[in-house]
Image: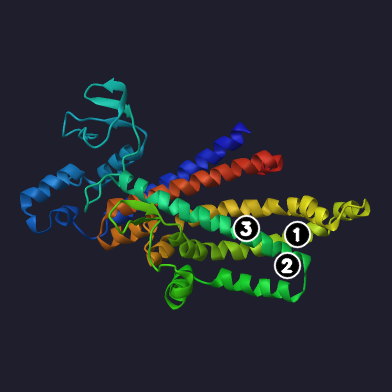
Amino acid sequence: MLRYVGKRLLYGFLVLLGVVTLVFFLFNVLPGDPARMMLGQRADAESIEAINRDLGRDKPLVTQYINYLNDLSPISLHNNQDSSSFFYLSSDKYSYATLLRLGSTSLVVKTPYLRRSYQSQRKVSEVISTAFPQTAVLALTAMLFALAVGITLGVISALHKDSWLDRLSLVLSTLGMSLPSFFAAILIAWLFAYVMADWTGLNMFGNLFSVDDYGEGEYLDLKNLILPALTLGIRPLATLTQLTRNSMLEALSQDYIRTARAKGLSYRRVVVRHALRNALNPVVTSASGWLASLLAGAVFVEYVFDWKGMGVVIVDALDQYDFPVVMGAILFICVLLVIINILTDLVYGWLDPRVRVDR
């Protein structure tokens, strides 16, 4: 088991290293001078040189890459005394705890430093910590909606196989899986928040918290969550519906179902306590993967509904060439996906020892 865990962690680390490398070199070869972006009309040669020196962009690209890895690592080398040092970084960049001193350079432990926004000068970690809870609430709500409706429709389709309900479910599931999120978001926003606004009372744009009309602060406005969660949940709902249907049909054909019926158990109890319970294993597995995808892929939906989550942050940062924010957001999402995948693999290995042998 320890060997299996170690291999999962090693694969996860290699994936993260590859993503960090790709993101760094991709965004450092794009056109644009961060110093000019930060200074605007006030740009002059001395100011540009000072900012590039502060950002470390006066060093060779390979040195910048090593320093970037050093910033991201929770255990790193730090030097705030000698500005010519390879690992020089002034102490106002982040807080740290010293583990070991090596002359003017120290081995320190810290939270990963994702640099600062070119536009707002806020730490990227602060930008992400503000936006991600909005995305997490949206993704979790969409996933709960998809699970509740998808499992219900899947069970109904399986119990009424080849009926008009089953065929309708198949058509709607196929449509849901093939419908692009961006188009679905525009269509749903137009239909429910514009055409039917008088009946639904829903807003085309909005956030989890709305500003009080009387200037008394913010209040929780859950109705703004309905349309983006519905839109984001369409594709996992379609997938989970068909997966539940197929799993239920397979479970209902097993010998233990016939045995339970022969013992006199009611049909409802056989379906709920035996067939559905065993049919949910692949559904839960798929749901964990979908949750990770929703956390990472809500960009279009958030942008259409102006939901102040990671999607809006990434799009706005790209529009303003605010590369540290884009890089930090991509890396954060990648770390999240890797962690979820590792946890899923560990659960697989715990539930089925054959997985640990095969891998």
Residue bearing mark 1 = 248
Numbered tag placed on residue 157 in the rendering:
2
Instruction: Tell whether label 3 touches label 2 (CB within 8 Å).
Output: no
Residue 61, position as x, y percentages in the image: 25, 47
* First of labels 1, 2 by sequence position: 2
Residue bearing mark 3 = 148
Residue at screen point 25% across, 46% down = 122
Amino acid under label 2? Ser
112 left or right of 281 in image? left
Residue 36, position as x, y percentages in the image: 14, 56
Tell me the CA gap for discs 1 and 2.
9 Å
Residue at screen point 93% across, 50% down = 263
340 left or right of 270 in image? left
Residue 104, position as x, y percentages in the image: 21, 24
Instruction: Tell whether label 2 touches label 1 (CB within 8 Å).
Output: no
324 left or right of 247 in image? left
